[in-house]
Amino acid sequence: MKNIVLIGFMGVGKGSVAREIVKVSKMVALDTDDIIESMENRRIKKIFAEEGEPYFRALERKVARWLKKNVDNTLISTGGGFYKVPNLKKVGTIVLLNAPFDVIYRRILEHPNAEKKLKKRPLFQDIEKARALYEERLPLYLKVADIVIDVENKEIPKIAKEILKKVKLK
Ligand code: S3P
């Protein structure tokens, strides 16, 4: 089977869904932000602060090239801006987790670690800027996605099941 690549806005639940898919299938998972943090031996927040966003985006492109060459049969969760790397579709089947901005924001705020979740995301420091980024990206997410999963009001296990079913039909 090809890789499954989860894309979507910050906080939409890519990580939680990836962990659930690992639990209920034989797939193993990788996360592009985790790979970047290990490559750099520092947190995303620090990479943004010390090197700036273009440096981080170059790392994402490097990870995408590596995934294309070396990784198969894997569930890959990505950072919210990873959808922009060239030839994303060559990495695997692209699955967009989709929800309105306010639903995503509420999901973060309701989390017991909400403050930490917001703090670690440099592009979620100002809510109106984050909302504008969401509006700008939504059509681009939809364009690159092979499969769109609406996640509003759905429990994580249901989302995972839906993804596995739809990917098999592709
Ligand atoms: C980003 C999303 C983050 C992380 C970085 C940039 C983005 O990942 O890659 O802070 O551009 O949307 P999450 O989507 O896991 O928050």
Image: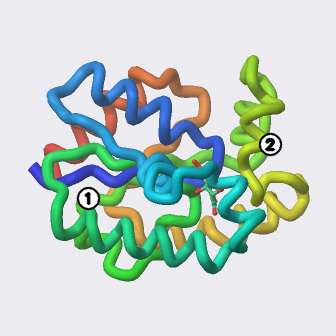
Secondary structure state at the residue bearing disc 1? strand
> Is tag 2's residue or tag 1's residue first in the polypeptide sequence?
1
Label 2 – label 1 distance at C-alpha: 31 Å
Q: Quadrant of ligand 1?
A: bottom right
Residue at 32% of width from left, 62% of height from top?
Answer: 146
Mark 2 vs mark 1: give the one in front: 2
The answer to which of 89 and 103 lies nearer the viewer is 89
- Looking at the rendered structure, the kind of residue marked 2 is Lys
Compared across the picture, whether 125 is left or right of 158 comes to right
Q: Which mark is residue 93?
A: 1
In the rendered image, the residue lying farthest to the left is: 1
Residue 7 in view (yes/no): no
Amino acid tagged 1? Thr
Residue that protrudes farthest toward the front in the picture: 41
Quadrant (top left/top right/bottom left/bottom right) for the C terminus? bottom left
Nearest the camera: 10 or 146? 10
10 Å neighbourhood of mark 2: few (<14), some, or many (≥20)?
Answer: few
Picture residue at 33% right of the left edge, 34% below the top: 162
What x and y, as percent, mark residue 26?
A: 15, 28
Disc on res. 119: 2
Q: Is residue 137 above or below residue 170?
A: below
Judged from the image, the secondary structure of the residue bearing numbered disc 2 is helix
Q: Is residue 133 visible?
A: yes
Up-down relation of residue 37 to residue 132 (above or below): above
Q: Residues within 10 Å of mark 1 (few under 14, many from 20)?
A: many
Please name the residue shown 60% across and 76% down the image. Answer: 55
Colour scheme of the picture: rainbow
Q: Position of residue 13 (x, y in %)?
A: 55, 37
**Residue 169 x, y percent position in the rendering:** 15, 47
In which quarter of the view is residue 63 placed? bottom left
